[in-house]
Amino acid sequence: EKVDATEKTLGVVREMAAAMEEHRAELTQLDSAIGDGDHGTNMHRGFQAALERLETSEPSTPADVLKVVSMALVSKVGGAAGPLYGTAFLRASSALPGEGKPSAADVAAALEAALQGIKQRGRAEPGDKTMVDALEPAVRAARESGGEGVAAMLRAAASAAAEGAEATIPLTARKGRASYLGARSAGHKDPGAASTAYLLAAAARALEA
Ligand code: ADP
Ligand code: MG
Ligand code: MG
């Protein structure tokens, strides 16, 4: 049976929500070390709200699905990450075609749009120890992955994001709450970079299935 693109996108969101549930405690622990210890609960709450809204709304395109997710994240995640991820999903939604199955190039463009949205909104640059340090290498990997389809592209993006998240450990935070710690923020992985890597891995997993 052929599963249509909207149904696949719903599958991606379900897998993302499951990942935020699975990694809730870990993300919160990371945020306890250099923030206020709520990132896991924030993200879990936001993705549960997204699932609920997707049940009652009837999105008819992948872009619609991402738009519903964006609205749920903006209203339910809170803190710094809510508006940033909300912007990311909204920009990704706008970058997708209004109808039809998104191509690998469309998905790469959506990731790029998400990154630009986060950078504009949060004014973070690579090296500031934020989610940008996971998403920027992911976008680069997506752009460079050639012609193997959307799932393979997202897998490459997810691996690059995980490496980017690991690479935040020695950095000193220059944005967000962690920056209040100054040099004491070094030695810990950034929670937002970690959640970005988990979300991309979830997207890849959903499309590989
Ligand atoms: P809060 O810090 O308000 O409690 P969260 O704990 O949910 O919000 O999210 C913290 C994460 O948000 C950080 O780990 C970092 O990745 C990300 N973040 C914070 N400020 C910025 C920013 N200006 N630009 C990009 N990402 C940011
Ligand atoms: Mg926090
Ligand atoms: Mg908070």
Image: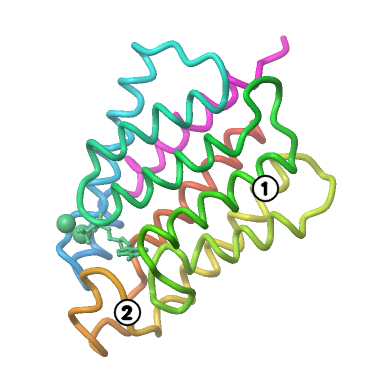
Query: Which residue was labeled with disc 1?
Result: 108
Tell me what residue is drawn at x 47 percent, y 72 percent: 166
Q: Is mark 2 within 8 Å of ligand 1?
A: no
What span is in magenta?
1-23
x, y percent for residue 129: 39, 74
Residue at 58% in and 54% down: 158
Q: Secondary structure at mark 1?
A: helix
Magenta region includes residue 9: yes
Q: Where the N terminus falls, by quadrant?
A: top right
* Residue 112 belongs to magenta span: no
Q: Residue 137: where, in percent of width, then height?
A: 60, 66
> Residue shown at 35%/52% (left/top)?
84
Q: Residue 132: horizontal and vertical position, in percent?
A: 46, 65
According to the picture, the residue beneath numbered tag 2 turns out to be 174
Percent from the top left, x then y, of residue 62? 57, 25
> Regarding mark 2 in the picture, which secondary structure is present there?
loop
Q: Earlier in the sequence, mark 1 or mark 2?
A: 1
Q: In the depicted view, which residue is nearer to us: 34 or 126? A: 126
Vertical side of 167 occupied by 120: above or below: above
- The one nearer the camera, 184 or 126, is 126
| Amino acid type, callout 1 | Ala
User: Height in image: 88 above or below 168?
Assistant: above
Residue 39: name its quadrant: bottom left
